[in-house]
Amino acid sequence: MTVSFLTTDKAPPPFSNYSQAVQIPAGARIVQVSGQVGVTPSGKLPSDPEQQHELAWRNVFAILDAANMNKSHITEVTAYVVDHHQVAIYRDVRDRMLEGERPASTLIVAGLANPDWKVEIAVTAARTDP
């Protein structure tokens, strides 16, 4: 799939590894993945924040795989972390898990539905080929 990564010097540059904007071509199949938290498929919640961040990404990738997509198809990420001290953890894990992919991205520091959850990640992905 060919997406357009839009950049302008008339807006601030990204503060980390993401794109200012991503344009999805007409006719692309779009999948919106609901927010995923760092819980195993069996419901186990690790206490370590970094493990939760990794699991949240793995859960996103599992859902994308079910849609015949992968990390290269992610066009937008919306992530929520519960503590601004974990922003660095989020960015480190995101960069490692995305392996150079740079979708548009929004990061919000806020509380989540379960106080034990440290992160929630939702993505939009697009693909033009089957």
Image: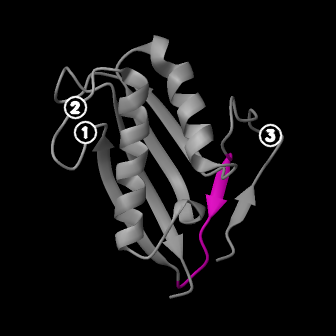
Mark 1 highlights which residue? 39
Amino acid carrying label 2: it is: Leu
Amino acid carrying label 1: it is: Val
Look at the image and name its color scheme.
one colour
How far across and down, in percent of the image, does residue 65 sit? 41, 68
- Viewer-proximal residue among 2 and 94: 94
How far across and down, in percent of the image, does residue 103 sit? 61, 52
Residue drawn at x 35%, y 71% is 66
Residue 12: in magenta span: no
Residue 128 against residue 117 in the figure, above or below? below
Disc 2 vs disc 3: Cβ atoms closer than 8 Å? no
Residue 64 against residue 118 in the figure, above or below? below
Q: Closer to the camera: disc 1 or disc 3?
A: 1
Residue 26: in magenta span: yes
The residue at the far bottom in this view is 130
Q: CA distance from mark 2 to mark 1?
A: 5 Å
For the magenta stretch, what is the residue range?
Answer: 19-27
Mark 3 highlights which residue? 10
As helix, strand or loop, the secondary structure at mark 3 comes to loop
Sequence-first disc among 2 and 3: 3
Q: Is residue 103 left or right of residue 12?
A: left
How far across and down, in percent of the image, does residue 26 sit? 57, 81
Characterize the local packing of mark 1: few (<14), some (14-19) or many (20 or more) Cα atoms within 10 angstroms: some
Residue 113 occupies quadrant: top left
Mark 2 highlights which residue? 45
Residue drawn at x 68%, y 38% is 17
User: Which quadrant of the figure contains the N terminus?
Assistant: bottom right
Q: Main secondary structure of the magenta part?
A: loop
Residue 25 against residue 46 in the figure, above or below? below
Q: CA distance from mark 2 to mark 3?
A: 43 Å
- Viewer-proximal residue among 78 and 89: 89
